[in-house]
Image (cartoon, helix red, strand yellow):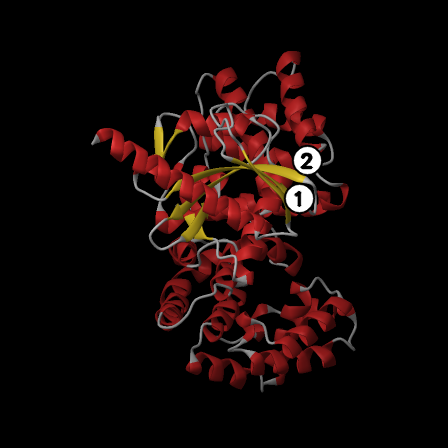
Amino acid sequence: MDEARAYDSLNDGNRAAAAIWSALTDLAPNISQVVQIDTPQDRTHADILAFLSEISAPFHVQAKKLSRNNRKLEIKHFEDWLRTGVPTVLMWRDNETRKIYWADMLRFLFRTGGTKDRKTATVNEQHDMHELDVTDEASKAKFVSRIRALCEWWPDRNTRWRVEIPQSLVDVCADPDVLLYLPVSLQLVDLLDVYMGCRQSRFELSRKVLQAARNGVDSPYAASIELIRQCGLPERDRDLLRRVEECFRGWRDRIPRDRKKFTKETLWAFDKLQSLFGYQQSGDLWVPEFRARNTYPISRLINLLPEKAFIEPLRRVLEQDTDLNALLYASWCLGNLNLNRPATDELWREVRTLRIESLRSRTDRIGEKWTLVDRQLRYTEAQLGSGEGQQEFERKLTDDTVGQFEAAYNFAYYSGDRHLIRDRFERRLDEGYRTDMNVRTILALDYNHLQKFLKVDDRAWRTLRPQSWRP
Protein backbone atom coordinates (compact mmCIF):
# COMPACT_ATOMS: atom_id res chain seq x y z
CA MET A 1 0.00 0.00 0.00
CA ASP A 2 2.82 2.38 0.91
CA GLU A 3 4.61 1.60 -2.36
CA ALA A 4 1.42 2.21 -4.34
CA ARG A 5 0.81 5.53 -2.56
CA ALA A 6 4.41 6.57 -3.21
CA TYR A 7 4.05 5.65 -6.90
CA ASP A 8 0.81 7.67 -7.19
CA SER A 9 2.48 10.64 -5.51
CA LEU A 10 5.45 10.45 -7.90
CA ASN A 11 3.10 10.16 -10.88
CA ASP A 12 1.12 13.21 -9.68
CA GLY A 13 4.37 15.14 -9.32
CA ASN A 14 5.46 14.23 -12.82
CA ARG A 15 2.09 15.28 -14.26
CA ALA A 16 2.34 18.62 -12.47
CA ALA A 17 5.89 19.22 -13.71
CA ALA A 18 4.91 18.32 -17.28
CA ALA A 19 1.94 20.75 -17.17
CA ILE A 20 4.13 23.53 -15.84
CA TRP A 21 6.72 22.84 -18.54
CA SER A 22 3.95 23.04 -21.17
CA ALA A 23 2.63 26.34 -19.73
CA LEU A 24 6.10 27.88 -19.89
CA THR A 25 6.51 26.85 -23.54
CA ASP A 26 3.18 28.57 -24.25
CA LEU A 27 4.78 31.86 -23.12
CA ALA A 28 6.85 32.03 -26.33
CA PRO A 29 8.19 34.34 -27.69
CA ASN A 30 8.76 35.88 -24.22
CA ILE A 31 10.44 32.67 -23.13
CA SER A 32 12.72 31.16 -25.74
CA GLN A 33 13.79 27.83 -24.26
CA VAL A 34 12.28 25.52 -21.67
CA VAL A 35 14.41 22.52 -20.71
CA GLN A 36 13.52 19.79 -18.23
CA ILE A 37 16.33 18.96 -15.81
CA ASP A 38 16.76 15.20 -15.41
CA THR A 39 18.86 15.35 -12.23
CA PRO A 40 17.49 18.12 -10.02
CA GLN A 41 19.25 16.88 -6.87
CA ASP A 42 21.94 19.56 -6.98
CA ARG A 43 22.18 22.96 -5.31
CA THR A 44 19.58 24.43 -7.66
CA HIS A 45 16.87 21.94 -6.56
CA ALA A 46 15.25 22.81 -9.87
CA ASP A 47 13.15 20.79 -12.31
CA ILE A 48 13.16 23.19 -15.26
CA LEU A 49 15.63 25.62 -16.83
CA ALA A 50 14.12 28.41 -18.95
CA PHE A 51 15.42 31.50 -20.75
CA LEU A 52 13.85 34.95 -20.93
CA SER A 53 14.14 35.99 -24.59
CA GLU A 54 14.34 39.78 -24.32
CA ILE A 55 17.47 39.84 -22.17
CA SER A 56 18.74 36.30 -22.84
CA ALA A 57 18.67 35.50 -19.12
CA PRO A 58 18.21 32.05 -17.57
CA PHE A 59 16.00 31.21 -14.60
CA HIS A 60 15.21 28.00 -12.74
CA VAL A 61 11.80 26.60 -11.85
CA GLN A 62 10.98 24.21 -9.06
CA ALA A 63 7.77 22.50 -10.20
CA LYS A 64 5.48 20.68 -7.76
CA LYS A 65 1.98 19.34 -7.40
CA LEU A 66 -0.04 21.75 -5.24
CA SER A 67 -0.52 20.33 -1.76
CA ARG A 68 0.00 21.48 1.81
CA ASN A 69 3.21 19.45 2.12
CA ASN A 70 4.58 20.84 -1.14
CA ARG A 71 4.06 24.43 0.03
CA LYS A 72 6.36 23.71 2.98
CA LEU A 73 9.96 24.31 1.88
CA GLU A 74 13.34 23.82 3.50
CA ILE A 75 15.25 26.99 4.34
CA LYS A 76 18.53 25.40 3.25
CA HIS A 77 17.03 25.20 -0.26
CA PHE A 78 16.31 28.93 -0.18
CA GLU A 79 19.90 29.58 0.86
CA ASP A 80 21.16 27.44 -2.02
CA TRP A 81 18.94 29.30 -4.47
CA LEU A 82 20.25 32.64 -3.25
CA ARG A 83 23.85 31.52 -3.91
CA THR A 84 23.37 30.28 -7.47
CA GLY A 85 23.34 33.73 -9.12
CA VAL A 86 20.28 32.66 -11.15
CA PRO A 87 16.73 33.34 -9.92
CA THR A 88 14.51 30.42 -8.98
CA VAL A 89 10.74 30.60 -9.41
CA LEU A 90 8.51 28.36 -7.31
CA MET A 91 5.58 26.87 -9.27
CA TRP A 92 2.74 24.49 -8.45
CA ARG A 93 -0.01 22.81 -10.43
CA ASP A 94 -3.37 21.90 -8.91
CA ASN A 95 -4.02 18.58 -10.64
CA GLU A 96 -7.74 18.74 -9.82
CA THR A 97 -8.52 22.22 -11.16
CA ARG A 98 -5.58 22.16 -13.61
CA LYS A 99 -4.58 25.66 -12.52
CA ILE A 100 -0.93 26.70 -12.27
CA TYR A 101 0.44 29.03 -9.60
CA TRP A 102 3.77 30.74 -9.00
CA ALA A 103 5.44 32.56 -6.12
CA ASP A 104 8.08 35.27 -6.02
CA MET A 105 10.72 33.79 -3.73
CA LEU A 106 12.30 37.11 -2.76
CA ARG A 107 8.98 38.70 -1.90
CA PHE A 108 8.12 35.64 0.19
CA LEU A 109 11.38 35.91 2.11
CA PHE A 110 10.91 39.63 2.68
CA ARG A 111 7.35 39.06 3.90
CA THR A 112 8.28 36.31 6.32
CA GLY A 113 11.61 37.61 7.66
CA GLY A 114 14.41 35.97 5.68
CA THR A 115 16.29 32.71 6.19
CA LYS A 116 17.67 32.94 9.71
CA ASP A 117 16.46 31.12 12.81
CA ARG A 118 14.15 28.60 11.13
CA LYS A 119 14.45 25.35 9.22
CA THR A 120 11.29 25.41 7.10
CA ALA A 121 8.90 27.99 5.67
CA THR A 122 5.39 27.53 4.28
CA VAL A 123 4.18 29.48 1.27
CA ASN A 124 0.76 31.05 1.87
CA GLU A 125 -1.75 30.52 -0.95
CA GLN A 126 -3.48 33.86 -0.34
CA HIS A 127 -0.48 36.13 0.25
CA ASP A 128 2.31 34.58 -1.85
CA MET A 129 0.85 32.67 -4.79
CA HIS A 130 -0.30 34.06 -8.15
CA GLU A 131 -2.16 32.20 -10.87
CA LEU A 132 -0.49 31.84 -14.26
CA ASP A 133 -3.22 31.61 -16.88
CA VAL A 134 -1.60 31.35 -20.32
CA THR A 135 -4.90 32.34 -21.97
CA ASP A 136 -5.01 35.66 -20.10
CA GLU A 137 -2.74 38.48 -21.32
CA ALA A 138 -2.66 40.30 -17.96
CA SER A 139 -1.70 37.11 -16.12
CA LYS A 140 1.10 36.37 -18.60
CA ALA A 141 2.38 39.96 -18.51
CA LYS A 142 2.52 39.95 -14.71
CA PHE A 143 4.56 36.72 -14.67
CA VAL A 144 6.98 37.77 -17.42
CA SER A 145 7.47 41.24 -15.93
CA ARG A 146 8.39 39.83 -12.54
CA ILE A 147 10.74 37.24 -14.03
CA ARG A 148 12.49 40.00 -15.94
CA ALA A 149 12.94 42.07 -12.78
CA LEU A 150 14.34 39.07 -10.91
CA CYS A 151 16.73 38.20 -13.74
CA GLU A 152 18.02 41.78 -13.95
CA TRP A 153 18.51 42.38 -10.24
CA TRP A 154 19.25 38.93 -8.75
CA PRO A 155 22.13 39.20 -6.25
CA ASP A 156 25.44 37.73 -7.39
CA ARG A 157 26.06 36.25 -3.99
CA ASN A 158 24.63 36.25 -0.50
CA THR A 159 24.87 33.75 2.32
CA ARG A 160 22.12 34.45 4.84
CA TRP A 161 19.15 36.76 4.55
CA ARG A 162 17.47 38.40 7.49
CA VAL A 163 15.25 41.23 6.40
CA GLU A 164 14.90 44.22 8.75
CA ILE A 165 12.08 46.21 7.19
CA PRO A 166 8.55 46.72 8.52
CA GLN A 167 6.18 43.94 7.43
CA SER A 168 3.87 46.50 5.81
CA LEU A 169 6.64 47.56 3.38
CA VAL A 170 7.25 44.11 1.90
CA ASP A 171 5.72 45.00 -1.49
CA VAL A 172 8.29 47.78 -1.97
CA CYS A 173 10.71 45.05 -3.05
CA ALA A 174 8.81 45.00 -6.35
CA ASP A 175 10.62 48.26 -7.19
CA PRO A 176 13.80 47.40 -9.14
CA ASP A 177 15.93 49.99 -7.33
CA VAL A 178 14.93 48.63 -3.91
CA LEU A 179 15.39 45.05 -5.09
CA LEU A 180 18.93 45.79 -6.23
CA TYR A 181 19.73 47.62 -2.98
CA LEU A 182 18.52 45.01 -0.45
CA PRO A 183 21.36 42.48 -0.89
CA VAL A 184 24.06 45.10 -0.15
CA SER A 185 22.01 46.33 2.80
CA LEU A 186 21.90 42.83 4.24
CA GLN A 187 25.64 42.33 3.72
CA LEU A 188 26.48 45.60 5.48
CA VAL A 189 24.09 44.98 8.38
CA ASP A 190 25.70 41.58 8.95
CA LEU A 191 29.19 43.13 8.79
CA LEU A 192 28.37 46.01 11.17
CA ASP A 193 26.53 43.69 13.53
CA VAL A 194 29.76 41.72 14.00
CA TYR A 195 31.95 44.82 14.43
CA MET A 196 29.57 46.45 16.92
CA GLY A 197 28.91 43.36 18.95
CA CYS A 198 25.12 43.69 18.70
CA ARG A 199 25.16 47.10 20.46
CA GLN A 200 22.44 48.33 18.08
CA SER A 201 19.41 46.54 16.69
CA ARG A 202 19.65 45.26 13.13
CA PHE A 203 16.73 47.52 12.21
CA GLU A 204 18.65 50.60 13.43
CA LEU A 205 21.70 49.47 11.45
CA SER A 206 19.62 48.94 8.30
CA ARG A 207 18.29 52.52 8.60
CA LYS A 208 21.85 53.88 8.90
CA VAL A 209 22.91 51.88 5.83
CA LEU A 210 19.93 53.19 3.87
CA GLN A 211 20.65 56.81 4.80
CA ALA A 212 24.30 56.48 3.75
CA ALA A 213 23.51 54.56 0.56
CA ARG A 214 22.25 57.58 -1.36
CA ASN A 215 25.79 59.00 -1.21
CA GLY A 216 27.04 55.58 -2.31
CA VAL A 217 25.46 56.07 -5.73
CA ASP A 218 27.99 58.87 -6.41
CA SER A 219 30.83 58.02 -4.02
CA PRO A 220 31.16 54.64 -2.30
CA TYR A 221 34.07 56.04 -0.25
CA ALA A 222 32.05 59.00 1.07
CA ALA A 223 29.14 56.69 1.89
CA SER A 224 31.49 54.35 3.77
CA ILE A 225 32.93 57.18 5.89
CA GLU A 226 29.43 58.47 6.64
CA LEU A 227 28.18 55.03 7.67
CA ILE A 228 31.17 54.28 9.91
CA ARG A 229 30.75 57.64 11.64
CA GLN A 230 27.02 57.08 12.15
CA CYS A 231 27.79 53.76 13.83
CA GLY A 232 30.43 55.30 16.09
CA LEU A 233 33.19 53.07 14.74
CA PRO A 234 36.81 54.23 14.17
CA GLU A 235 37.46 55.67 10.72
CA ARG A 236 41.08 54.60 11.05
CA ASP A 237 40.09 50.93 10.87
CA ARG A 238 41.28 50.37 7.30
CA ASP A 239 39.98 46.82 7.07
CA LEU A 240 36.47 47.91 8.03
CA LEU A 241 36.59 50.87 5.63
CA ARG A 242 37.78 48.62 2.80
CA ARG A 243 35.05 46.05 3.37
CA VAL A 244 32.26 48.62 3.62
CA GLU A 245 33.49 50.44 0.51
CA GLU A 246 33.67 47.15 -1.42
CA CYS A 247 30.02 46.50 -0.61
CA PHE A 248 28.90 49.96 -1.70
CA ARG A 249 31.09 49.90 -4.81
CA GLY A 250 29.87 46.47 -5.93
CA TRP A 251 26.29 47.69 -5.62
CA ARG A 252 26.96 51.04 -7.30
CA ASP A 253 28.62 49.34 -10.29
CA ARG A 254 25.46 47.29 -10.91
CA ILE A 255 23.22 50.35 -11.17
CA PRO A 256 22.61 51.28 -14.84
CA ARG A 257 23.99 54.75 -15.54
CA ASP A 258 20.60 56.12 -16.60
CA ARG A 259 19.00 54.97 -13.33
CA LYS A 260 21.38 56.54 -10.81
CA LYS A 261 19.18 59.62 -10.24
CA PHE A 262 16.08 57.45 -9.85
CA THR A 263 17.91 55.13 -7.45
CA LYS A 264 18.82 58.02 -5.15
CA GLU A 265 15.24 59.29 -5.20
CA THR A 266 13.82 55.82 -4.55
CA LEU A 267 16.12 55.16 -1.58
CA TRP A 268 15.22 58.58 -0.15
CA ALA A 269 11.51 57.73 -0.45
CA PHE A 270 12.11 54.25 1.01
CA ASP A 271 13.74 55.84 4.05
CA LYS A 272 10.78 58.22 4.52
CA LEU A 273 8.31 55.34 4.33
CA GLN A 274 10.29 53.42 6.95
CA SER A 275 10.14 56.52 9.16
CA LEU A 276 6.40 56.72 8.63
CA PHE A 277 5.72 53.06 9.40
CA GLY A 278 7.91 53.23 12.49
CA TYR A 279 6.32 56.49 13.67
CA GLN A 280 5.52 56.74 17.40
CA GLN A 281 5.84 60.41 18.39
CA SER A 282 6.41 63.91 17.05
CA GLY A 283 9.89 64.17 15.52
CA ASP A 284 10.05 60.57 14.24
CA LEU A 285 9.17 61.66 10.69
CA TRP A 286 11.62 64.17 9.25
CA VAL A 287 10.80 65.41 5.78
CA PRO A 288 12.04 68.40 3.75
CA GLU A 289 9.84 71.18 2.41
CA PHE A 290 6.52 70.05 1.02
CA ARG A 291 7.28 70.19 -2.71
CA ALA A 292 6.19 68.23 -5.79
CA ARG A 293 9.78 67.13 -6.51
CA ASN A 294 9.79 65.38 -3.12
CA THR A 295 6.30 63.89 -3.20
CA TYR A 296 6.77 62.22 -6.61
CA PRO A 297 9.25 59.48 -5.53
CA ILE A 298 7.13 58.77 -2.44
CA SER A 299 3.99 58.39 -4.55
CA ARG A 300 5.74 55.79 -6.75
CA LEU A 301 6.35 53.56 -3.73
CA ILE A 302 2.92 54.22 -2.21
CA ASN A 303 1.39 52.72 -5.35
CA LEU A 304 3.19 49.43 -4.64
CA LEU A 305 1.76 49.02 -1.14
CA PRO A 306 -1.63 48.03 0.26
CA GLU A 307 -3.43 51.32 0.90
CA LYS A 308 -5.01 50.30 4.20
CA ALA A 309 -1.56 49.78 5.72
CA PHE A 310 -1.00 53.55 5.60
CA ILE A 311 -4.06 54.66 7.53
CA GLU A 312 -2.88 53.97 11.08
CA PRO A 313 0.63 55.53 10.81
CA LEU A 314 -0.77 58.57 8.97
CA ARG A 315 -3.43 58.94 11.65
CA ARG A 316 -0.72 58.96 14.36
CA VAL A 317 1.17 61.75 12.58
CA LEU A 318 -1.93 63.90 12.10
CA GLU A 319 -3.07 63.38 15.68
CA GLN A 320 0.10 64.44 17.45
CA ASP A 321 2.89 65.89 15.28
CA THR A 322 3.75 69.60 15.40
CA ASP A 323 6.12 69.79 12.43
CA LEU A 324 4.54 71.68 9.54
CA ASN A 325 6.05 69.59 6.75
CA ALA A 326 5.35 66.24 8.46
CA LEU A 327 1.69 67.23 8.75
CA LEU A 328 1.52 68.39 5.13
CA TYR A 329 3.06 65.16 3.82
CA ALA A 330 0.79 63.00 5.99
CA SER A 331 -2.32 64.82 4.76
CA TRP A 332 -1.14 64.60 1.14
CA CYS A 333 -0.43 60.84 1.50
CA LEU A 334 -3.91 60.23 2.88
CA GLY A 335 -5.51 61.93 -0.13
CA ASN A 336 -3.46 59.81 -2.56
CA LEU A 337 -4.52 56.40 -1.25
CA ASN A 338 -6.49 54.27 -3.70
CA LEU A 339 -9.42 53.50 -1.41
CA ASN A 340 -12.99 52.65 -2.32
CA ARG A 341 -16.23 53.30 -0.51
CA PRO A 342 -17.26 52.76 2.26
CA ALA A 343 -13.62 53.12 3.42
CA THR A 344 -13.35 56.65 1.97
CA ASP A 345 -16.61 57.76 3.59
CA GLU A 346 -15.34 56.74 6.99
CA LEU A 347 -11.94 58.26 6.34
CA TRP A 348 -13.04 61.72 5.20
CA ARG A 349 -15.18 62.04 8.31
CA GLU A 350 -12.13 61.18 10.39
CA VAL A 351 -10.05 63.76 8.48
CA ARG A 352 -12.66 66.42 9.28
CA THR A 353 -12.56 65.52 12.97
CA LEU A 354 -8.76 65.63 12.98
CA ARG A 355 -8.81 69.06 11.35
CA ILE A 356 -11.47 70.62 13.54
CA GLU A 357 -10.53 69.10 16.89
CA SER A 358 -6.99 67.72 16.92
CA LEU A 359 -5.26 70.26 14.66
CA ARG A 360 -6.86 73.29 16.33
CA SER A 361 -5.54 72.14 19.73
CA ARG A 362 -1.91 72.37 18.49
CA THR A 363 -1.88 75.61 16.50
CA ASP A 364 0.37 77.41 19.00
CA ARG A 365 2.98 74.64 18.75
CA ILE A 366 2.79 74.34 14.96
CA GLY A 367 3.09 78.11 14.46
CA GLU A 368 1.29 80.63 12.27
CA LYS A 369 1.56 78.41 9.20
CA TRP A 370 -0.83 75.86 10.72
CA THR A 371 -3.40 77.20 8.26
CA LEU A 372 -1.41 75.54 5.46
CA VAL A 373 -2.15 72.20 7.11
CA ASP A 374 -5.80 73.19 7.47
CA ARG A 375 -5.90 73.89 3.73
CA GLN A 376 -4.29 70.56 2.83
CA LEU A 377 -6.61 68.60 5.13
CA ARG A 378 -9.64 70.32 3.56
CA TYR A 379 -8.34 69.34 0.11
CA THR A 380 -7.75 65.76 1.32
CA GLU A 381 -11.30 65.61 2.67
CA ALA A 382 -12.61 66.68 -0.73
CA GLN A 383 -10.37 64.12 -2.50
CA LEU A 384 -11.80 61.35 -0.33
CA GLY A 385 -15.31 62.15 -1.48
CA SER A 386 -16.85 64.53 1.03
CA GLY A 387 -19.53 66.44 -0.88
CA GLU A 388 -19.73 69.03 1.86
CA GLY A 389 -15.94 69.40 1.85
CA GLN A 390 -15.91 69.90 -1.93
CA GLN A 391 -18.59 72.61 -1.75
CA GLU A 392 -16.82 74.42 1.10
CA PHE A 393 -13.53 74.44 -0.80
CA GLU A 394 -15.15 75.65 -4.02
CA ARG A 395 -17.02 78.39 -2.15
CA LYS A 396 -13.77 79.62 -0.58
CA LEU A 397 -12.17 79.93 -4.02
CA THR A 398 -14.74 82.51 -5.07
CA ASP A 399 -12.98 84.91 -2.67
CA ASP A 400 -10.15 86.62 -4.61
CA THR A 401 -7.95 86.88 -1.51
CA VAL A 402 -8.26 83.14 -0.88
CA GLY A 403 -7.74 82.55 -4.61
CA GLN A 404 -4.47 84.47 -4.45
CA PHE A 405 -3.38 82.46 -1.46
CA GLU A 406 -4.30 79.19 -3.20
CA ALA A 407 -2.33 80.24 -6.29
CA ALA A 408 0.68 81.06 -4.12
CA TYR A 409 0.34 77.72 -2.32
CA ASN A 410 0.43 75.78 -5.61
CA PHE A 411 3.17 78.05 -6.99
CA ALA A 412 5.36 77.19 -3.99
CA TYR A 413 4.46 73.47 -4.17
CA TYR A 414 5.73 73.33 -7.76
CA SER A 415 8.84 75.34 -6.79
CA GLY A 416 7.88 78.24 -9.04
CA ASP A 417 8.36 76.19 -12.20
CA ARG A 418 5.82 77.74 -14.57
CA HIS A 419 6.25 75.08 -17.25
CA LEU A 420 5.74 72.30 -14.69
CA ILE A 421 2.64 74.05 -13.30
CA ARG A 422 1.03 74.30 -16.72
CA ASP A 423 1.97 70.75 -17.66
CA ARG A 424 0.71 69.17 -14.42
CA PHE A 425 -2.56 71.07 -14.22
CA GLU A 426 -3.44 70.63 -17.89
CA ARG A 427 -2.64 66.92 -17.78
CA ARG A 428 -4.64 66.44 -14.59
CA LEU A 429 -7.63 68.26 -16.04
CA ASP A 430 -7.41 66.44 -19.40
CA GLU A 431 -6.64 62.91 -18.21
CA GLY A 432 -8.68 62.76 -15.00
CA TYR A 433 -6.34 60.94 -12.61
CA ARG A 434 -7.92 58.72 -9.97
CA THR A 435 -6.88 60.97 -7.07
CA ASP A 436 -8.44 63.99 -8.85
CA MET A 437 -11.81 62.37 -9.50
CA ASN A 438 -13.57 64.27 -6.69
CA VAL A 439 -11.71 67.58 -7.04
CA ARG A 440 -11.88 68.41 -10.75
CA THR A 441 -13.87 71.60 -10.15
CA ILE A 442 -11.39 72.67 -7.47
CA LEU A 443 -8.50 71.99 -9.87
CA ALA A 444 -10.13 74.09 -12.58
CA LEU A 445 -10.69 76.99 -10.15
CA ASP A 446 -7.13 76.66 -8.87
CA TYR A 447 -5.76 76.76 -12.41
CA ASN A 448 -7.78 79.88 -13.23
CA HIS A 449 -6.28 81.65 -10.21
CA LEU A 450 -2.81 80.40 -11.14
CA GLN A 451 -3.08 81.69 -14.70
CA LYS A 452 -3.76 85.17 -13.32
CA PHE A 453 -1.03 84.76 -10.75
CA LEU A 454 1.62 83.57 -13.22
CA LYS A 455 1.48 86.97 -14.91
CA VAL A 456 2.69 88.55 -11.65
CA ASP A 457 6.30 88.77 -10.52
CA ASP A 458 7.66 85.45 -9.18
CA ARG A 459 8.29 86.99 -5.76
CA ALA A 460 4.69 88.08 -5.29
CA TRP A 461 3.65 84.83 -3.59
CA ARG A 462 6.10 85.49 -0.78
CA THR A 463 4.08 88.54 0.31
CA LEU A 464 0.98 86.43 0.91
CA ARG A 465 0.72 85.28 4.51
CA PRO A 466 -0.92 82.03 5.64
CA GLN A 467 -3.68 84.07 7.28
CA SER A 468 -5.00 84.68 3.75
CA TRP A 469 -6.46 81.21 4.09
CA ARG A 470 -9.30 81.65 6.58
CA PRO A 471 -10.28 78.31 8.23
Res 103 → quadrant: top left
Label 1 SS: helix
- Residue 51 image offset from top left, x and y in percent: 63, 41
Please state which of residues 221 and 318 is positioned toward the viewer in this rendering.
221
Q: Residues within 10 Å of mark 2 (few under 14, many from 20)?
A: some
Label 2 SS: helix
* Residue 462 horizontal side relative to residue 165, left or right: right
As drawn, 150 above or below 418: above
Mark 2 vs mark 1, foreground winner is 1
As drawn, 202 above or below 390: above
As drawn, 358 above or below 263: below
Q: How far, Cα to Cα, is label 2 from label 1?
A: 11 Å
* Residue 275 horizontal side relative to residue 177, left or right: left
Residue 286 seen anywhere in this rendered image of the structure: no
- Residue drawn at point x = 63 percent, y = 82 percent: 444
Residue bearing mark 2: 215
- Residue drawn at point x = 38 percent, y = 65 percent: 354
Mark 1: amino acid: Thr
- Residue 401 image offset from top left, x and y in percent: 62, 81
Residue bearing mark 1: 263
Mark 2: amino acid: Asn
Contact, mark 2 vs mark 1 (Cβ under 8 Å): no
- Residue 288 image offset from top left, x and y in percent: 60, 51
* Residue 81 horizontal side relative to residue 9, left or right: right
